[in-house]
Image (cartoon, coloured by chain):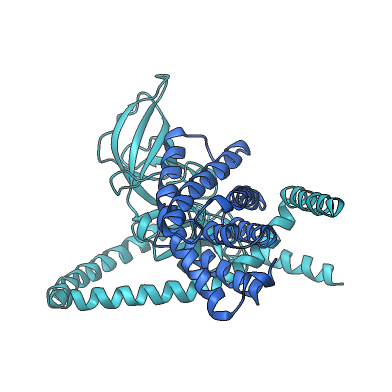
Amino acid sequence: MAYLVMAFSLFLAGLVQATPWLAIAKPPALLGVVLYYALVRGRRPMLVAAGAGGFIQDALGMSPIGYSSVCFALIGLIVNHFRNLLFTSRVVTHIVIGAVAAGAGALCLGLLLSGGGYVPIDSTLFLSRILATTALGAITVPLIYRFVDFLHGRLGASGNAMS
Amino acid sequence: MRVRGFIVWLLVIVSLVGILSLGDGTSGRLKSIVREAFAPVQHLVAGGVRSTRENITAVRNIGDVMAQNERLEAELVQLRNDVLTLKSLEQENIQLRDQLLYEDRSDRELVSCEVIARDVTGWWQTVRLGKGYLSNIDKDMAVITPEGLIGKTVESTPKTADVLLVSDPNCRVSVQIARTGTYGVLSGLGVPEGGRVVCRMSFISKRAKIRQGDTVVTSGLGGIFPQGLMVGYVESVALDAIGLAQQARVIVRSELSALTHAFVVVEAEDPVDELLRRRAAEVQEE
């Protein structure tokens, strides 16, 4: 059940991220789901969410499969490692972690894509995308966190079932 | 316990390397499966939001309906007159082509598609259409709106097709200035400026006299974009960094940020090609 909640959350996050009315700015909804598991659940469910979320992002987009999974997993591992030092249930934590992780995720993916020659290296474009994603991360991640937490709570899919 | 942990990490790394080195074919198939799974829901969401937005706009603009109706009636009369004139010109054109023994122009049809999604990462300027190769939409086909060119198809699954917009730096289009016939290559700048989509037209001859406001259309060179599709207009012209050619800033006429529908320009099936394809399929079946 817990993994079904994860799959459903990732599916919805994928839909939100691909919305046609958000022209250039992309809310990091899939990364938000990964961050929830990194903050609240164990390493294993976080890695599963990172792999699946990254796969959905790459499959729906133009990036080669695997690139986003690598970025999500790296960010998830770092957040998961330091989660004992954080007030994981505070909204401020979600805003800050959301902003930093979204910026870092955009930077990581951008570097991988430019390195692979998939997107042109343009410093202005690069910086503006990272800043925009950082801002959106601060807004999106707390909302996603609440949503996934609500689903887990309502459906009785506790974290114990995942670790 | 330590050995088990090491094996798990090793498996994770090996599978990650395996995924990262997937071939284009396998990767394309995997992407196709996910896109097809998302497409029906994306259709629903896109349709629902669009109709809600249209209803709200209709209620808000109810007072303008009479005035709009009058204007449209006048436009209809004008267009009917234009059609009559064009019909006689078409007839004349056919006769002249016959006399000059011109080859028949290939027929093109427009496939109307709904825009159901956009690129999820933000690193590309793409939109996803709700029709794919089951509707004869393939890779490398021009995509237009009534205002003009918006891009080309880059990937196609049975029921979806991805369009790389002209605003993306990776999208290059061979264009020409309609007034002078001067050629150039158009590429996107990536981000809109003040709500407008700006592109760069490069490799323009140094001697060409280009004015602000000149119309830019596709040249037909390169094989993807048919000739004469409206792209936009010139905002400014300057010499490039080396000083060997001119480059112009071009404002794209189509509204790329609010796309709801688009048309894919599909070449009509050549009867000979179709026959050969059918024969090849029959041989394969045998």
Q: Is residue A72 above or below residue B266?
A: above
Q: Is residue A89 left or right of residue B32?
A: left
Closer-to-camera residue (B109/B240): B240
What x and y, as percent, mark residue A136? Answer: 41, 53
Q: Is residue A2 above or below residue A72?
A: below
Q: Hue of chain B? A: cyan
Quadrant, the N terminus of chain B: bottom right
Looking at the image, which is closer to me, A139 or B248? A139
Viewer-nearest residue: B179 or B32: B32
- The part of the image, by quadrant, that contains residue A161 is bottom right
Residue at left 44%, top 44%?
Answer: A129
**Chain A: drawing colour:** blue
Residue A87 in sight: yes
Res A157 quadrant in image: bottom right
> In this orientation, does residue B134 appear?
no
Which residue is at 47% across, 76% downward? B44
Q: Position of residue A99 (x, y in %)?
A: 45, 49
Task: Give the residue at x 52% y 46%.
Answer: A106
Give the x, y percent position of residue B28: 68, 58
In percent of width and height, residue B127 lies at 48, 58
| Quadrant of the rendering where the C terminus of chain B is positioned | bottom right
